[in-house]
Amino acid sequence: MKRIFSSITDGRGFDIGLVGVPFAFLFILAGLPLLYNILMSFQEVDMFSLGSIIRPFVGFKNYIDLFKQPETLPILYNTVIFVVGSIAGQFLVGFGLALFFWVNFPGSSWLRGLFLVSWVMPGLVVGAIWNWILSGDFGVLNFFLRESGLIDSNIFWRSDPHFSLWAVILANIWLGTSFNMILLSVGLSSIPDDLYEAAELDGANAWQRFWTITLPMMRSTIGAIISLGLIFTLQQFDLFAAITDGGPNNSSNVAQYWAWDLSFRQYDFGKGATISVIMTVFVMFAAIVYVRSTRHEVRG
């Protein structure tokens, strides 16, 4: 007993427990639901059989039927547009702000802190705010566009099929820009000033210093940001529920919102789980890219 107690407190048993307890916690709260979701995607599940684990096994029928539905490809296309537009917008605006605050002018610290407001706000609150901004009748965005002469009449952002998806993309860019800005600011601050001083002495202009020093030195940071952005964007649900509800006519519907709609509105839990499994594959791909992009930083 003494040897066992000694091993637990200061030895191999302690090391195993230090790793095993968090692993068991993650497996119970994340691993088991993931496995259960994969199992549901191969079963016929409705609201009457939801409480039972043993249900009719249908193989890949849910996957085949899902891609036979006419709305599947347009919704997947919307998902790609939403992910690419959100990540590109968040990265470009965040990088611009990071470079702007990199100058470190007087008051930059508290001004940069104001940008964090969007990141700490709940998604439903952000959706409510952007509902007012994007309102077709009295929205602030339409007011500024009219006053600047860019439009002649109001744009109904939330109800027009041509603009509804972009309305959510705008809100999501605003929501995630500060996160990109903070991570990119950390990456910029880690670049030694000596490199810029040496390049400036060699006659390199601002663009050449940015292209040959800043971007290569921030490659791992950029890879991590894009990977995390893909994961966070595929998890985005609140903005769709608060702004467009996936409409009109699925013009702003995306995979993550469609999975919820199939499961909890249409009670087709099998197809909802199928969409979740497909999205999990993309999230796992993003996680692999994220780990590979940060591997050098961890070792260094």
Image: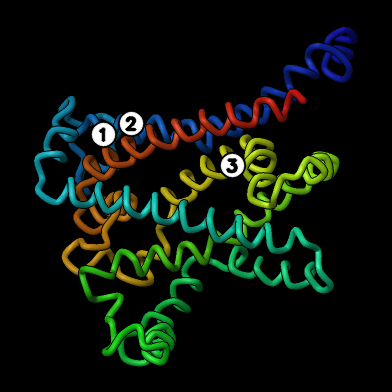
State yes or no: discs 2 and 3 in contact (Cβ < 8 Å).
Answer: no
226 vs 6, nearest the viewer: 226
Would you say the residues marked 1 and 2 are in contact, meaning their CB atoms lie under 8 Å apart?
Answer: yes
Which residue lies at the image location 31% right of the left edge and 36% below the top edge?
Answer: 278
Q: Nearer the viewer, residue 253 or 298?
A: 298
Mark 1 Cα within 10 Å, few/some/many (few <14, many 20+)? Answer: many
- The residue under label 1 is which amino acid type? Ser
Q: Is residue 103 left or right of residue 143?
A: right
Q: Which residue is mark 3?
A: 222
Of the 4 image quadrants, the one containing the N terminus is: top right
Please state the total of marks drawn on the protein image. 3
- Which residue occupies the foreground of this view, 22 or 287? 287
Q: Which residue is mark 1?
A: 41
Q: Secondary structure at mark 3?
A: helix
Mark 2 or mark 3, whichever is nearer to me: 3
Measure how far apart labels 3 and 1 are at the Cα level: 34 Å
Q: Position of residue 29 (x, y in %)?
A: 53, 38
Q: Which of these two is toward me, 85 or 119?
A: 85
Return the residue at label 2: 38
> What SS does tag 2 mark?
helix
Q: x, y percentage for residue 34?
A: 42, 34
Residue at (85% x, 13% y) in the render: 11
Q: Is residue 54 visible?
A: yes
